[in-house]
Image: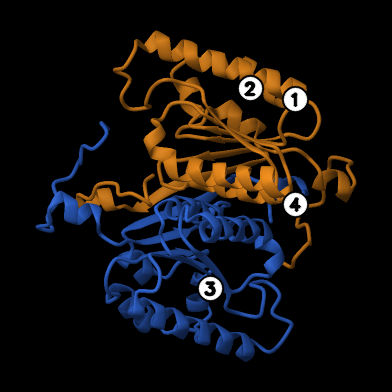
Chain colours: A blue, B orange
Amino acid sequence: MAKGVTPVQAADGLTTRQRRNSPLVIVHGGAGKGKSTAAFGLALRGWNQGWSIGVFQFVKSAKWRIGEQAALAALDDVNRSTGQGGPIEWHKMGSGWSWSRKAGTEEDHAEAAREGWEEIKRRLADETHTLYVLDEFTYLLTWGWLDIDDVVDSLTDRPGYQHVVITGRDPHPRLLEIADVATEMTKIAHPFDKGQKGQKGIEW
Amino acid sequence: MAKGVTPVQAADGLTTRQRRNSPLVIVHGGAGKGKSTAAFGLALRGWNQGWSIGVFQFVKSAKWRIGEQAALAALDDVNRSTGQGGPIEWHKMGSGWSWSRKAGTEEDHAEAAREGWEEIKRRLADETHTLYVLDEFTYLLTWGWLDIDDVVDSLTDRPGYQHVVITGRDPHPRLLEIADVATEMTKIAHPFDKGQKGQKGIEW
């Protein structure tokens, strides 16, 4: 495809500029690697545009995102000290792991997740950020902790120019329906298959 | 799966520590988005580990990676000025686009790509970096610009502890054979489908 050539004629009545400036819902699903790393890669692009970025980490231990968190915090520092790029906030919204919910009851985790989602809704209403990374957010819907109607309505009704990237396996079909961009990361080969374990710099 | 539990018994005779420290070949293929962004997300993790990172951009215009390049350059600056993280180099190895090879002849581009690959081979032999991002590298094989035997041998025979991440559509089957981790990014929905065009912060 040649650069800048749109293969399908738009049926939305928008000008090219309007379409270019459409805020997007982006979903990274699938069982393969890269769902979250690709979301943080997008954050690099947004940072360079001077966007305010909010990362909302829902269900994984801090250990597994320490690299991204440290690097994005360093970029936030660069923004504060030099004005280059944009500000980046990182919020841990839950208290548990996706695969080890021993600490606290499930209801504790569900309540923490719901409070986190309410905070995101407030920020969307206030147009706090230009890019939201809702990391591992799909599981909250899979587990029934959030109401899909509430999530869909809040995303589709969000005001202004706010991109939202959602990661996690098995995204709810209605999330995919409202997504402007959705990618499924599928595993082709994996070191776990050979009995390998995660290693620093690669898994966290 | 519980954290740290390996589902398949390793048959390689290595200890857990040895497997943890295995250098990996990682391939991000498929027609969907996220191949390169996920590679740059991995670079954030490696940076935080203090790794030397080399990014080798083969066939795309600088425009489409300006966000990542600026952000990774800022992280390299942080490393130089504070010692946090690791050094990051960014090298443009070709002179053309993957979809617009008008500027220069095809042979010019092929020659530039071959020279770039020779430089990477020298660095692998010298153990220059801990993480190599070979962005859009698969096309060089698709187009027959590089010899697959040479690429496979150079990757599998590389000394020491060096991770190599390769991105691009239609990775050569032999690349997938030697990959320790391979993910296919598949498009589920996409703004181009609605006649949308790329926009800053998202596409570059």
Q: Chain of mark 3?
A: A
Residue at the image point whose x is 46% and y is 22% from the top = B142
- Name the side, left or right, on which A10 lies relative to B41: left
Kind of residue at badge 3: Tyr
Q: Give the alpha-carbon distance from disc 2 to disc 3, as whole Å.
A: 40 Å
- Tag 4 and tag 1 share a subunit: no
Nearer-the-camera pick, B75 or A187: B75
Q: Are marks 2 and 3 in contact (CB under 8 Å)?
A: no
One can see residue B146 in this view? no
Q: Chain of mark 4?
A: A
- Name the side, left or right, on which B202 lies relative to A106: left
Q: Secondary structure at mark 1?
A: loop
Q: Which residue is mark 1?
A: B158
Q: Which residue is mark 4?
A: A200
Residue at the image point whose x is 16% and y is 49% from the top = A16
Q: x and y percent of residue A151 in the render?
A: 38, 79
Q: Chain of mark 2?
A: B
Q: Nearer the viewer, mark 1 or mark 3?
A: 1
Q: Give the alpha-carbon distance from disc 2 to disc 4, as whole Å.
A: 24 Å
Q: Which residue is mark 2?
A: B120
- In the displayed structure, A72 sits above or below B104; it is below
Q: Residues within 10 Å of mark 4 (few under 14, many from 20)?
A: some
- Name the side, left or right, on which A135 lies relative to A64: left
Q: Give the alpha-carbon distance from disc 4 to disc 1, as whole Å.
A: 20 Å
Nearer-the-camera pick, B8 or B102: B102
Label at residue A186: none
Nearer-the-camera pick, A202 or B13: A202
Q: x and y percent of residue A193 in the render?
A: 71, 48
One can see residue A63 in this view? yes
Q: Residues within 10 Å of mark 2 (few under 14, many from 20)?
A: many
